Image (spheres, grey):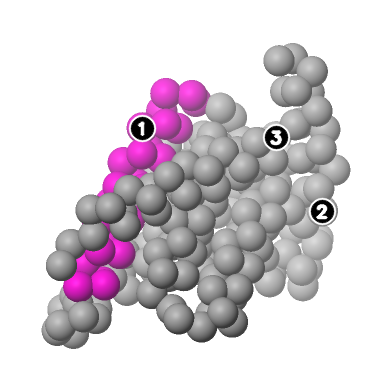
Amino acid sequence: INTLHSLDIRVSQSLSICATKDASFMRFVLIILEISGHGVPWITGSLLAIYLYRGLEQQIALNFLLALIIDLAVVGTTKVLFKRSRPVYNAQDMFVTVSVDNFSFPSGHSTRAAMMAGICSVLTPSVFGKALVYTWALAIAMSRVMLGRHHVSDVVCGALIGWAQYLLIVKIWLT
């Protein structure tokens, strides 16, 4: 276990090429990507869609909101249970954080991205659309390590948790 932990830390640090603020343009792009996977825009968008739409669109937005609430509960509880510190090289400049965000395991962005990509892939008939949402989820996971926010194991486990949440949501889909 110690060897795996050490390997995780070493690999994560070597991949954190945009962890410092002098990484300029690439860091800026990854922070925009980071915001796209943050809970605030997803929850806000879901609430707005529930208010503005009726029918199928409202049903989808309601299920998005349910999924996001489940994600917050699972990630928040897991972070408090494990209390794994963020990498020491993480710049403390994250967008809208709360106390559990001081912990890194699991990556909430990775859980959310994997879960939402799974849900969105079911909702789109297009192969291109499916590829796009899965590429976005992978990019979110990679950005977490590249920005120095997480260790590789945080994002891998986060993606697995997110996929499990997706499987749950499609089973309990509200109609």
Foreground mark, 2 or 1? 1
Front position in the image: 139 or 166: 166
Q: Which residue is at the far top?
A: 2
**Residue 46 placement, left or right of 133:** left
Identity of the residue drawn at 54% across and 47% down: 159
Say which element carries label 2: loop
* Quadrant in which the N terminus is drawn: top right
Q: Is residue 161 left or right of residue 4?
A: left
Who comes first in sequence, dot 2 or dot 1? 2
Judging by the rendered image, the residue that carries numbered circle 3 is 88
Q: Callout 3, which amino acid? A: Val
Range covered by the magenta-colored residues: 59-83
Q: CA distance from mark 2 to mark 1?
A: 30 Å
> Does residue 146 show up magenta in the picture?
no
Amino acid identity at mark 1 = Thr
Residue closest to the eye, 102 or 8: 8
| For residue 89, above or below residue 143 | above
- Residue assigned mark 2: 17
Q: Quadrant of the C terminus?
A: bottom left
Q: Which residue is mark 1?
A: 77
In the image, residue 74 lies in the stretch drawn in magenta: yes
CA separation, marks 1 and 3? 22 Å
